[in-house]
Amino acid sequence: MTKSEIFTQIRQKESYLCVGLDTDIQKIPPHLLKEKDPIFAFNQQIIDATAAYCVAYKLNIAFYESLGAKGWESLEKTLAYIPPNIFTIADAKRGDIGNTSALYAKAFFENMNFDSITVAPYMGIDSVTPFLQYDNKWVILLGLTSNEGSADFQRLRLESGEYLYEKVLKASQQWANDEQMMYVVGATHPETFKQIREIVPNHFLLVPGYGAQGGDLQTVSKLGLNSEGGLLVNSSRGIIFASNGKDFGNVAQKEAKKIVAEMKIYLHS
């Protein structure tokens, strides 16, 4: 999917919502456990309920691969069910030496046909470039993540005075342009968005940490939006697990609709 196609979705839906399908078998409504494939049954209803409101779905691979072969089957069925005009993200956080990364890229871009994959940059350029060999596929590089542990390394000051995550943002722009690379920037660090936008003014930012992790949509939107939208704000638990009853699809839809109503204000302000 191209950058212009993503922007078209944002403009048409007046939304930059990404729904995270972090489907935990321990948290789905109990009545679904009777289904042949409970994970897919859950995802199917969530997609039906939210597809009109979101522009992307992010599938956290750990929730699927932890279930073995059945989990991979659920993942592939879910991916095939997502409407083709909605951007898909394999939240796999891969990143290894070149020949291994090439196989990861083949797995997620050829065998499963995801539009994008999250990649860890800390093994350097040769661990990232294999993912950049595919047309209309995206690397979403970990910039500044939303977890508390991001302070351990990502927010270390270098001798140059810049933070390590800033060094990653600057250096990685030599690897790919804004038509092929996005960055993960957590909503739990709203004070960083102004500086990050100065470094990467035209790139899309995938923003986790909104909702259950306490990120502030207003601040992120004010400082993170650009002329092409430029944001994919992810909500997982706050939407998909908003209800544990048989009404979970309807409740998820209401939550997504509420978020998008707020996003419309920021898009037009």
Image (spheres, helix red, strand yellow):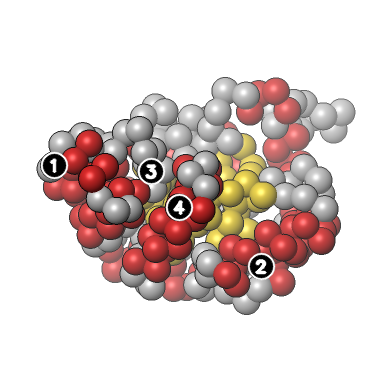
- Mark 2 residue element: helix
Q: Quadrant of residue 80?
A: bottom left
- Report how far apart the C-alphas of labels 2 and 1 lie in the structure: 38 Å
Gap in Å between the C-alphas at discs 2 and 4? Answer: 20 Å
Q: Secondary structure at mark 4?
A: helix
> Disc 2 designates what residue?
106
Q: Residue at x 77, y 50 (%)?
A: 96
Q: Which residue is pictured at 52% across the width and 41% down the height?
A: 66
Residue 237 image point, x, y percent: 34, 36
Residue to which mark 4 is pinned:
70
Residue on which the image places disc 3 = 23
State if disc 3 and disc 4 touch (CB < 8 Å): no
Tell me if mark 3 has few (under 14), some (14-19) or many (20+) residues whose alpha carbon lies within 10 angstroms of its own: many
Amino acid type assigned to the residue bearing label 1 in the image: Lys
Label 1 vs label 3: CA separation? Answer: 16 Å
Q: Is residue 201 above or below residue 167?
A: below
Looking at the rendered structure, the number of numbered marks drawn on it comes to 4
Q: Earlier in the sequence, mark 2 or mark 3?
A: 3
Question: What residue sits right under mark 1 in the picture?
Answer: 246
Counting from the top left corner in percent of width and height, residue 241 is at 28, 37
Mark 2 surroundings within 10 Å by alpha-carbon count, few (fewer than 14), some (14 through 19), many (20 or more): some
* Amino acid type indicated by mark 4: Lys
34 and 79: which is toward the camera: 34
Residue 227 appears in the picture as rendered: no
